[in-house]
Image (cartoon, rainbow, N blue to C red):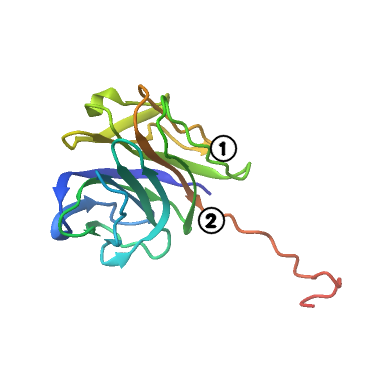
Amino acid sequence: MTVAYDLASNIGATTGDCTGTTWSHGGAAANVKGVLVYIAISNSNTPPVGVTYGGAALTKIAEANDTSTEKGNCTAWFLGVAVAQGARYVTVDVGSSQLWCGACITVTGVADTETYYGVVQENAANPSPTVTVPATFVSYPTAGMYSGLAAPTDIAAGTGYTAFGGVDQGNDVAQFERYTTGTVTGTPTINFTSATDDCAMVAVAMGEVQWTPVDPMGASGFFGV
């Protein structure tokens, strides 16, 4: 079993909460099994309070903070069970004054999904978080990053990835990337190419839940015991 890329959308520089019908994501009509939302916040280490997709709450699975010269925050939010189908709205509760932007990625499949992630939160060139997954795990890798660099074009996608939704937030930027073609089996390499600067990066690999086989005979050797 494996997942497949469905769609990526993004919202540009926004101040305050995102409610109602502001951010629409046109997910597939059927078989959407995972939704991942990245939020990059400028000049703050305070993450969003919550994110929803199609009215369902997402779980914050990872957070990175740049705490040095140019503060920034990047979080990843995920739902892998009972995902709403078709076009849905993303809402973000981030407070009335925070400046932020975001990206949403959906995948299709046949089973519920799960994630593995890594973070980088320091001054770094070519940031590349370690995302360790089981050897047989088939995933769709993605990443989001806040940076103190001058423009989104200063951050290039890693080999095999496509950058999308880059946002100039004034004194700093955000960039997002997704795997370009197919999926990865085992531990993926997820990275951006950039100069050294403040950065807060989160990388996430989404894939179908790996079920552990259960011996019906049990440890005793008798069925059901």
Q: Which residue lies furthest to the front in this view?
A: 69
N-terminal-most mark, 2 or 1: 1
* Crowd tier of the residue under label 1, counting other residues whose Cα lies within 10 Å: few below 14, some 14–19, many 20 or above: some
Say how many tags the image has.
Answer: 2
The amino acid on which the numbered mark 1 sits, given as a three-letter code, is Thr
Q: Position of residue 86 (x, y in %)?
A: 25, 57
For badge 2, the amino acid type reads Val
Q: Residue at x 29, y 57 (%)?
A: 48
Residue 132 position by quadrant: top right
Q: Which of 44 and 1 is in front in this view?
A: 44
The percent coordinates of residue 73 (x first, y second) are: 32, 46
Q: Residue at x 42, y 35 (%)?
A: 122
Q: Name the residue under label 2.
A: 209
For residue 225, which quarter of the picture?
bottom right
Give residue 90's position: percent from left, percent from top.
23, 57
Element class at badge 1: loop
Q: Are marks 2 and 1 in contact (CB under 8 Å)?
A: no
What separation in Å lies between label 2 and label 1 (alpha carbons)?
16 Å
> Which residue is identified by label 1?
187
Give the x, y percent position of residue 140: 45, 41
| Tag in front: 2 or 1 | 1
